[in-house]
Image (cartoon, grey):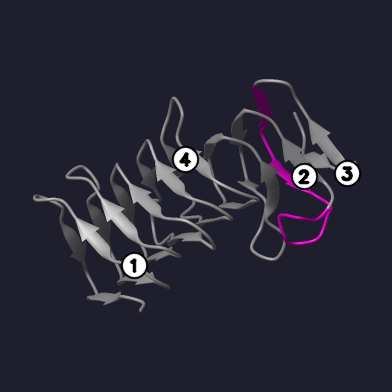
Amino acid sequence: MGEVRIDTADFSAVGGLELFSNASIGDTGAANPSAPNQLQAGTLRLDAGTGVGDGSNPLNTAVTSIDAQTTGGGIFIDEIDAVQLGNTAPVTTGSGGGAIEITAGGTMTLAQAVTTTGGGLISLTTTAGNLQVDHAVTAGGSIVLTGDTGITHTAAGDITSGGTITATTTTGDIAMADGTVYSAGGGCHPHRGE
């Protein structure tokens, strides 16, 4: 299997959609979730050898949940509204040390772990709604968490970084259940909005 490229105005599937490539998965559209070349489905599974999207052109989606993994390379996704990360499996990059950068236009819920290896960073952002951390986030590099209306951790929502941890809200609180742990090799930087 070679590269998978979405080059139609929109690509829609009823129910679930699964894309597999031993190379990369991406699109040819603009780098924002309202642009054309958007994957539309209920559940989305992405399994790529060398990456999903890239830093300058994330994969644009309109789905309810995302399972994504790579053998090498990063995972870069712009979701138009609310999304669940991890439906049946963790969101993870392989031994290549690729980053995970996912932005959602609504509440983002971590229903599975989100993990990078090597020096890969993790950036999880909501531009509207809450960032709900129900499972662990672990990165060899830094971790950046941005919740528009807040960040909420359950006891299973530990954050472990080989670099720094930055947690920021536009409005609302950073709420941590008893037992939640932030562990960083380079320091923690929480910023609560007004």
Q: Which residue is mark 4?
A: 85
Quadrant that contains the C terminus: bottom left
Amino acid bearing label 1: Gly
Q: Which residue is mark 1?
A: 172
Nearer mark to the viewer, of 4 and 1: 1
Magenta highlight range: 16-35
Earlier along the polypeptide chain: callout 1 or callout 2? 2
Q: Which residue is mark 3?
A: 7
Amino acid bearing label 3: Asp
Marks 2/4 in contact by CB < 8 Å: the verdict is no
Query: Which numbered dot is residue 38?
Result: 2
Nearer mark to the viewer, of 4 and 3: 4
Distance between the alpha carbons at the discs numbered 4 and 1: 22 Å
* Residue 131 x/y as whole percent: 40, 54
Q: Secondary structure at mark 2?
A: strand
Distance between the alpha carbons at the discs numbered 3 and 1: 39 Å
Earlier along the polypeptide chain: callout 4 or callout 3? 3
**For the residue carrying disc 1, how many other residues have a C-alpha within 10 Å: few (<14), some (14-19), or many (20+)?**
some
Q: Secondary structure at mark 3?
A: loop
Distance between the alpha carbons at the discs numbered 4 and 3: 24 Å
**For the residue carrying disc 3, how many other residues have a C-alpha within 10 Å: few (<14), some (14-19), or many (20+)?**
some
Amino acid bearing label 4: Leu
Marks 4/1 in contact by CB < 8 Å: the verdict is no
Q: Is residue 126 magenta?
A: no
Residue 148 or residue 57, whichever sits in front: 148
